[in-house]
Amino acid sequence: MTSVLPLWFEIGSMIVLLTILAVDLLLIIKRPHVPSMREASIWVGVYVALALVFAGAIFLLGDVQHGTEFLAGWLTEYSLSIDNLFVFVLILGSFKVPSAYQQRALMIGIVLALIFRGVFILAGAALIERFVWIFFIFGAWLVWTAWQQVKPGEEEHGGDGWLIRQLKKVLPITDHFDGGKLRTTVDGKRMWTPFMLVLVSLGTTDLLFALDSIPAIFGITQSPFIVFTANVFALMGLRQLYFLLGGLLERLPYLKYGIAAILAFIGVKLVFHALHENELPFINGGEHVPVPEITTGMSLGFIVVAMAVATIASLVKANKDAKARGEHLRLGAAEHEDR
């Protein structure tokens, strides 16, 4: 897709966004702390507002198509980032990272996520430009990932995975943190701290999530600029969202079904697009296959509805569970009084 956005806007946007991330990282290094709910809420609101202002600028400087693609892409990446956030919660909890240094770990994890996604965006754009059939692979991968989200059984995240166990075998690692340092001195010997293992776990998690998120957003737009900026805005508020939602994620049991539905929907859309642009000789003789076209507006609508239904269903379930627990306690108290 040929961009209709001014070059100065694209270059300027990249500079501003990367500057914001750099300043954010420096502030965390200089003043490590646990943000209050109010502070976290304000920053999440600021980043969401910035994303909406950016979308408005695309509508004004570009066109409705590009603006809608950004909104759909941002919402998709934001929903996948929330899933990523849940894994971050498990990783930081399993390593018992001191609260004051969780922000630093999260910010470094987010920077790693941007690097991985940036590489994948460039690679994905190059593949799409040369091989239309790559959409078949992207689509199949997303449908498989959606099934992995909802299939019975729980996956283990973080903790002592295979890579972490290997690192512990070959590197001298202490059992205790030394602030936010990667290396420390114990009895005159230089050793790595568990903080290094935390960053490795976050990095490998980012790599796996990039494998899902990049094909997903390429199913909405093929503009590398929109793909990258949607990822940046989705990740920018992730650190504050961690402290705002950390304990609440467990109360959203149906969130994974909403995310799975979005991945499956975009996977099907990618396969349809590949069929529509088909050039493979063993499919319909190398001719285009007449299949329904899923528009960006339809994608945006489905994403919003899927996340809304998953969130509302989760809140309804949480409310019912709370009432059931209250009733159980009331009956228990009444039974105790009768005795």
Image: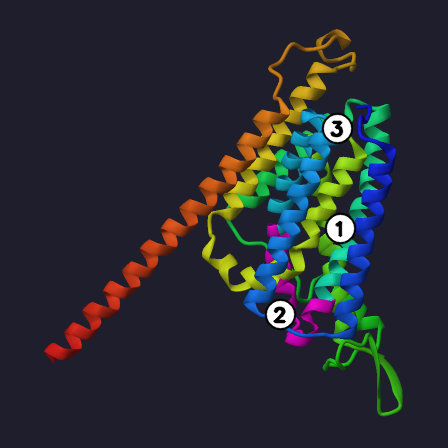
The residue wearing badge 2 is: 35
95 part of magenta stretch:
yes
Eye-nearest disc, 3 or 2: 3
Instruction: Give me the disc on residue 207.
Output: 1
In the picture, residue 277 is in which quadrant?
top right
Earlier-in-chain disc, 1 versus 2: 2
Classify mark 2: residues with Cα within 10 Å, few (<14), some (14-19) or many (20+). Answer: some
Q: Using the rendered image of the protein, determine whether residue 122 is visible from the camera's viewpoint.
A: no
Eye-nearest disc, 3 or 1: 3
Residue 289 vs 269, above or below: the answer is above
In front of the other: 268 or 148:
268
- Residue at horizontal 12 percent and vertical 80 percent from the top: 339
Question: What's the distance in space between the residues labelled 3 and 1, CA to CA?
Answer: 32 Å
Residue type beneath disc 1: Leu
Is 295 placed left or right of 3 in the picture?
Answer: left
Question: What's the distance in space between the residues labelled 1 and 2, CA to CA?
Answer: 27 Å
Q: Which residues are magenta?
A: 82-104
Q: What's the coloring here?
A: rainbow
Which residue reaches farthest front?
60
Q: Is disc 1 in contact with disc 2, using a CB cutoff of under 8 Å? A: no
Q: Secondary structure at mark 1?
A: helix
In front of the other: 317 or 25:
25
In front of the other: 185 or 49:
49
Residue type beneath disc 2: Pro
124 part of magenta stretch:
no
- Residue at horizontal 63 percent and vertical 61 percent from the top: 240
Q: What secondary structure predominates along the stretch shown in magenta?
A: helix
The residue wearing badge 3 is: 62
Q: Using the rendered image of the protein, determine whether residue 171 is visible from the camera's viewpoint.
A: yes
Q: Secondary structure at mark 3?
A: loop
Q: Quadrant of the N terminus?
A: top right
